[in-house]
Structure formats: C-alpha cells, structure tokens
Image (tube, rainbow, N blue to C red):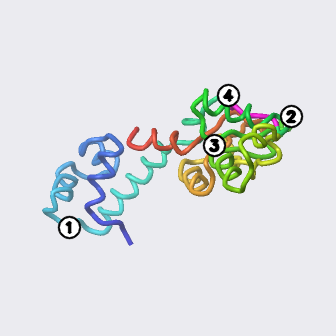
Amino acid sequence: MLPPLEDIGKRRRRLGINQRQLAKLAGVSQSLIAKIEAGQINPSYQKAKLIFDTLEMLERRVEHKAKDIYHKGVVGVNRDDPVVKATRIMHEGGYSQLPVFDGEKVVGSITEKTVLDSTLKGISIDRLSRMRVGEIMEEPFPLVDESAPLPAISALLQYAPAVLVTKMGKIVGIITKADLLKVVGRP
C-alpha cells in the first residue's frame, strides 16, 4: 500500500527539490507531478509507485547520521570526582548531563535530575557536596557508532538524556535531545 498522494508535495519540499527535478528522477512528466500535487488527478498505481520509490531513495540519501550532528570532545567526570565538581561543570558549561568515566571506560551518568533526586531522597546538600559521583551516578548513556541513523538515535533519546558516539570503539562525541532538535527542518 502506498502513502497518501498528498505526501508527494510535502516530501518533495522537505527534500528541497522542485517538481521538474522529481519528475526527471522518477521518469515521469513534470505536469503529472503538478497535477497530483494539486489534487487534479489520480495517477496509475505504477506511476505513483515510481514517484514514491524515488522520494524514498532521495530521503535515504540525505538521512543524517550520528557523525553529522554529534558534539566532538565529550565533557565528563570521573566516578571518584566529588559531586560538587560535576555540578560546577554542568553549571559553567551549560550541560544538563555528563557521562561518568573510570579511566577511558564509561561507567555511568550524572544529570541535573540525578542530583535533584538525591536531595528528594533526604540527602542534605552538605552531605551531597562531599559525596563522590560514583555514589549517586545512574546507568551509562547508550553508545552508538558514528554511522547510526537519526531515527535510531531519536528512539534512544526517548529513554536516555544523551547518546555517546563511538568510532572504532572509542568515544568521539555526544548527542543530546537539544542537538536532535537543531537538525529538525535542516536539509
């Protein structure tokens, strides 16, 4: 089953191509594309399939990958660092979350929510500032290869505040929900 014909114009515009370009790539006339988008005709199944297949091929070609949007140079803390150091880094750097390392290995994460939840659990601010990150850290952020497609990253960000990007097994960057929002609407 094909998508609704109304999607042709939307998808074409999202790709940043005109009717003539789509028609040429799909092997149909530009006037056919114009009439379909205007709702003046219902094309044959075969013509509609050609057009949708072409749109799909073009969309795959421009699909963003992790390597297109990640922040290079991951700022994090060590599990033995005091919580006060983590909160200072978050505050001064404008971060809402940080990965936690043990050497080069990611062992956890700390977020603004982690710190706030600790106070809700009855830990005093004074005691919390003396604690080590490893005592309150949460699960590590998910890891993806730099070739991971945006839909996969988006799915992970539904459950985690950030995703770490790897290349050849080494962490090279981080993607947050804010980074993902920046690419929405960008070709």
Label 1 crowd (10 A; few <14 / some 14-19 / many >=20):
few
Question: Quadrant location of residue 86?
Answer: top right
- Disc 3 and disc 4: Cα gap in Å? 17 Å
Task: Report the residue marked by disc 3.
Answer: 147
Q: Which residues are magenta?
A: 74-78
Residue 75 included in the magenta stretch of the image: yes
Q: Tell me whether circle 2 and circle 3 mark residues in contact (CB < 8 Å).
A: no
- Comparing 145 with 4, the one in front is 145
- Comparing 86 with 9, the one in front is 86
Query: Which residue is painted at 66% across and 44% down in the image?
Result: 111
* Mark found first going from the N terminus, 2 or 3: 2
Kind of residue at disc 4: Gly
- Disc 3 and disc 1: Cα gap in Å? 39 Å
- Disc 2 and disc 3: Cα gap in Å? 25 Å
Kind of residue at disc 3: Ser
Residue 72 included in the magenta stretch of the image: no
- The prevailing secondary structure element of the residues shown in magenta is loop
Residue 175: % across, % down? 60, 40
- Disc 4 and disc 1: Cα gap in Å? 52 Å
Label 3 crowd (10 A; few <14 / some 14-19 / many >=20):
some
Q: Residue furthest left?
A: 40
Q: Say above or below: 33 vs 167.
A: below
* Mark found first going from the N terminus, 3 or 1: 1
Task: Report the residue marked by disc 1.
Answer: 42
* Mark found first going from the N terminus, 4 or 1: 1
Q: Tell me whether circle 3 and circle 1 mark residues in contact (CB < 8 Å).
A: no
Secondary structure of the residue carrying tag 3 is loop
Residue 26: % across, % down? 33, 51
Classify the position of the C terminus by image quarter: top left
Task: Report the residue marked by disc 4.
Answer: 73
Mark in front: 4 vs 1: 4
| Label placed on residue 103 | 2
